[in-house]
């Protein structure tokens, strides 16, 4: 062995795991766990000042010595009993506790190129070998190994003129290619253990073909690493500084491995007569022979003979499915092209499965199959009964859906008459164009034929197409938006499909993935069409306000624009299908809790229908009609075994729930039914069913549901100055109530204190009310001089009880103003009068929202008279009849008008001025 010695340096050394060798040009993963020496070495290298600017970390990687190899690393030795003992001691040593005597004399300089850590596994250092070295002596072994080493450069000049070395190099390249072919073949055989991915094989082949004679040593190291060489053989190759000797050793290893793989392949490909009849049956032999011939045919790019009769049948079957699917002309053209490609393609090709999956998706899409709408005289009546039976209230949405049904019916009848006329005109045109001698029909002149054709085209253009509306139901949770869409599908007699858009962040979930990607698939819309199997279903786009905005994966809300635009969705293009699909026949119903997060362009495409929260009266009807029977059945009881009066239902609604929808109400009713189910079961077990009482009283609710969660405000019996009853609709919706506004004054300097968790809008209402009162204090009789400040020597405290509940919104300006006037004039406001409305600085009473909920809450609290802004007169039409009949509603336009209704007998000092203001406003 010739040694091309270089310089001697001091180098930190890292023992490799047993059985591991790092060769130059090869990358190795070194585990960091349980390696205190490696941890100490890395810490010292990173902490050195000289290394701060140098990001490359290098150290010597030195393998263990083998007990079957001599100390010089060249000769294999035979084992005896003492050697067996030595081998047992060797196996017990770990890399982290290695001694100097256990390490090999040769190693490789390693350069850290990265750190790798997979989930739930230990971290690894990625180290790349660069140069061989010989250990002269070890300087220390704790806290890590360090020694004087001699670096050896690769001497390639000696092999350029050596014909034997050149022949060995060519032999190495030939064996490498042969080994690659055999590995490819063996990876296709189930009997072989070696697996090789196509990507690795291509890189392997490219590396071999690009290697030149000057890189013979590198190729030898590379092949030694990837080959099936033993640990001792790799140690000998590591110690081979002479390139020619290294080539010879690697050629021997590859020759042995190639022969081993060839013998394995030969066993699987020989004929049946070569197998001993005692060990392998004829069937097994034929299966192995068939498997080998398939593998060889696949490598040659040929179709196996046994597949020639089977695959075309499957392609023909797929082709027939496409013919039956009623594809559009454009889709049929693309399908025919893909079928031709599929027939010419080898089934072993990866592209074959991609193409076949695409065609199966095309065949599954309902291009022309629709549900026939049976729109007869009973359709509207049946739909109205269906909607009324499933949902209480929601009159606007029911009205809109019945309008859609009526329009569909009119379109269908008009198109039927037009189709009849088009058919007759077409027959006349065909007969007159060819001339019918038996019926003596003369040939038409050119002008008459053109006139008939233009009339036919005009009739076809007048034929009405079905452009289904796109409805957006907006309302709080639990108000029946999702179940309403299902009722619509039932009333129309169409298929129903729900698409949940909550949390969709990727545009490809709507539009699909392009076919160039691995595991590409169509989007949610096309998958929905495949599932229902018809082109005119009812699609529910649930939670459209929860769709994600623009991000690095695209903008899914923007992708919905084409789906929901009536002018675009007849040519919707999915990225996977890449053929225009008609979505205009689909009835889209979207649901949302809020309009705030829906982009304006998307909102513009939809017809918005607002569903306000249910009122207490509506909740009572829903509970009696739907919720209580449902909970009785679901809890194992029968009709009549639970009896809930209206009083109990109202108490449950007002004291135990405060929500827009009815989900929590249903839960509470379920608790009541379960309580009665326990009583019924106990009575049945004790044979005392006659003692079971199905009636639930108001007094029982506290035992069943616990202490009341929400306390209802009740109108006061006696009025006092500075206290006014206002009206409030809680932000959770559906619940209205009265709200007391209390004002107290005390000696001070004009300061105003506000408490009761008031929002910014309510604070502004107090300021506006105080300003108006101060500006009109002389006219109200609060001061004797128009220039006197009524707040000069007093301070105010405005408070709204229930301080833990946030209160905000423009609704209490009128009440604040009346409370201030009541306090300053010492006139008590009658407690049976409640009011709502905002005021301006001119004293005008402005409209507010939530009138329906506020009036229901006022009636429930015992209020008799309600003052409302004049502009809210239209909102009272939505109030249930029983509420409007139970209240006296007075509409006011100005604060002076309100004062006249509150204190009809009061005399104001500036009565004349008051009339003047009213006439001006």
Image (cartoon, rainbow, N blue to C red):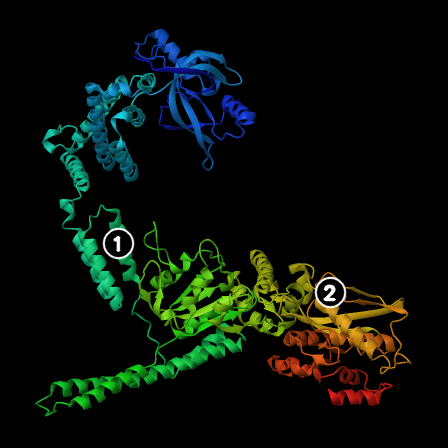
> Mark 1 sits on what residue?
355
Q: Quadrant of residue 340?
A: bottom left
Which quadrant: the C terminus? bottom right
| Badge 1: residue crowd in 10 Å (few <14, some 14–19, many ≥20) | some
Q: Quadrant of residue 677?
A: bottom right
Q: Residue pushed farthest left? A: 437
Question: In the displayed structure, does residue 163 sit left or right of residue 829?
Answer: left
Q: Position of residue 123 (x, y in %)?
A: 47, 32
Viewer-nearest residue: 330 or 650: 330
- Is residue 862 depicted above or below 654 in this figure? below
> Mark 2 sits on what residue?
758
Q: Position of residue 533 (x, y in %)?
A: 33, 65
Viewer-nearest residue: 264 or 910: 910
- Is residue 546 depicted above or below 430 in this figure? above
Q: Position of residue 680 (x, y in %)?
A: 57, 60
Q: Position of residue 104 (x, y in %)?
A: 39, 15
């Amino acid at each position: 062995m010739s040694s091309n010695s270089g310089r001697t340096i001091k180098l930190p050394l890292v023992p490799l795991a047993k059985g591991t060798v790092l060769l130059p040009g090869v990358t190795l993963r070194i585990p960091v766990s349980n390696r205190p020496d490696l941890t100490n070495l890395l810490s010292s290298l990173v902490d050195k000042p000289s290394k701060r600017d140098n990001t490359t970390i290098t150290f010597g990687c030195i393998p263990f010595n083998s007990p079957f190899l001599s100390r010089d690393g060249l000769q294999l030795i035979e084992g005896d009993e003492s050697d067996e003992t030595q081998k047992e001691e060797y196996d017990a040593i770990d890399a982290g506790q290695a001694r100097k005597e256990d390490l090999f004399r040769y190693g490789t300089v390693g350069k850290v190129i990265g750190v790798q850590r997979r989930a739930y596994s230990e971290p690894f250092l990625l180290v790349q070998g660069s140069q061989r070295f010989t250990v002269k002596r070890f300087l220390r072994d704790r806290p890590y190994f360090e020694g004087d080493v001699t670096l050896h450069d690769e001497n390639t000049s000696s092999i350029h003129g050596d014909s034997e070395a050149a022949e060995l190099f060519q032999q190495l390249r030939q064996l490498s290619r042969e080994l690659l072919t055999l590995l490819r073949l063996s990876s296709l055989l189930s009997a072989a253990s070696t697996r090789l991915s196509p990507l690795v094989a291509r890189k392997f082949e490219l590396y071999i073909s690009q290697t030149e004679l000057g890189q013979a040593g590198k190729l030898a190291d590379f092949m030694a690493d990837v080959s099936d060489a033993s640990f001792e053989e790799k140690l000998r190759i590591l110690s081979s500084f002479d390139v020619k000797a290294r080539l010879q050793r690697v050629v021997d290893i590859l020759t042995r491995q190639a022969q081993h793989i060839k013998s394995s392949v030969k066993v699987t490909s020989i004929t049946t007569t070569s197998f001993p009849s005692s060990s392998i049956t004829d069937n097994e032999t034929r299966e192995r022979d068939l498997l080998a011939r398939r593998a060889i045919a696949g490598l040659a790019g040929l179709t196996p003979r046994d597949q020639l009769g089977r695959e075309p049948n499957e392609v023909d079957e797929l082709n027939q499915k496409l013919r039956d699917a009623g594809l559009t002309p454009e889709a049929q053209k693309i399908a025919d092209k893909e079928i031709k490609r599929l027939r010419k393609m080898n089934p072993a090709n990866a592209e074959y499965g991609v193409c076949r999956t695409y065609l199966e998706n095309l065949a599954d899409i309902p291009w022309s199959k629709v549900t026939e709408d049976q729109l007869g005289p009973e359709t509207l009546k049946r739909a109205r009964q269906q909607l009324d039976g499933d949902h209480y209230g929601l009159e606007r949405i029911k009205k809109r859906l019945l309008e859609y049904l009526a329009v569909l019916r009119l379109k269908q009848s008009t198109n039927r008459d037009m189709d009849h006329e088009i058919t007759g005109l077409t027959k006349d045109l065909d007969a007159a164009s060819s001339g019918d001698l038996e019926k003596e029909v003369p040939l038409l002149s050119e002008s008459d034929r053109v006139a008939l054709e233009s009339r036919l085209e005009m009739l076809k253009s007048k034929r009405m197409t079905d452009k289904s509306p796109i409805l957006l139901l907006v309302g709080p949770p639990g108000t029946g938006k999702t179940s309403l869409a299902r009722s619509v599908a039932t009333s129309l007699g169409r298929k129903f499909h729900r698409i949940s858009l909550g949390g969709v962040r990727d545009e490809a979930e709507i539009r699909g993935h392009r076919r160039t990607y691995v595991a590409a698939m169509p989007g949610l819309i096309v998958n929905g069409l495949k599932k229902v199997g018809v082109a005119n279903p009812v699609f529910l786009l649930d939670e459209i306000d929860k769709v994600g905005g623009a991000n690095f994966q695209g903008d899914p809300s923007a992708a919905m624009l084409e789906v929901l635009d009536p002018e675009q969705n007849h040519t919707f293009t999915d990225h996977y299908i890449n053929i225009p699909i008609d979505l205009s026949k689909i009835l889209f119903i979207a649901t949302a809790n809020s309009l705030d997060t829906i982009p304006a362009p998307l909102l513009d495409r939809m017809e918005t229908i607002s569903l306000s929260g249910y009122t207490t009266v509506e909740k009572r009807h829903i509970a009696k009609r739907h919720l209580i029977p449902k909970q009785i059945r679901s809890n194992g009881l029968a009709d009549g075994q639970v009896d809930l009066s209206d009083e109990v239902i109202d108490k449950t609604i007002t004291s135990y729930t405060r929500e827009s929808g009815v989900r929590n109400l249903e839960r509470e009713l379920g608790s009541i039914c379960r309580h009665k189910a326990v009583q019924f079961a106990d009575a049945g077990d004790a044979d005392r069913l006659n003692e079971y009482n199905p009636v639930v009283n108001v007094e029982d609710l506290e035992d069943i549901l616990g202490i009341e969660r929400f306390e209802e405000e009740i109108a006061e019996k006696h009025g006092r100055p500075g206290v006014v009853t206002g009206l409030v609709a809680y932000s959770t919706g559906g619940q209205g109530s009265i709200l007391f506004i209390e004002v107290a004054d005390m000696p001070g300097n004009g300061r105003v204190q506000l408490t009761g968790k008031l929002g910014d809008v309510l604070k502004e209402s107090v300021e506006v009310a105080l300003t108006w009162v101060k500006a009109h204090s002389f006219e109200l009789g609060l001061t004797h001089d128009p220039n006197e400040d009524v707040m000069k020597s007093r301070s105010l405290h405005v408070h709204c009880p229930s301080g833990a509940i946030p209160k905000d919104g423009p609704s209490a300006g009128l009440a604040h103003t009346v409370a201030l006037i009541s306090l300053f004039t010492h006139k008590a406001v009658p407690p049976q009068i409640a009011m709502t409305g905002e005021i301006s600085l001119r004293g005008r009473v402005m409209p507010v929202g939530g009138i329906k909920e506020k009036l229901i809450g006022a009636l429930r609290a015992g209020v008799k008279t309600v003052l409302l802004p004049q502009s809210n007169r239209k909102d009272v039409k939505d109030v249930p009849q029983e509420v409007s009949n139970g209240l006296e509603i007075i509409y006011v336009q100005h604060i002076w008008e309100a004062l006249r209704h509150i204190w009809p007998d009061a005399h104001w000092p500036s009565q004349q001025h008051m009339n003047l203001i009213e006439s001006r406003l």
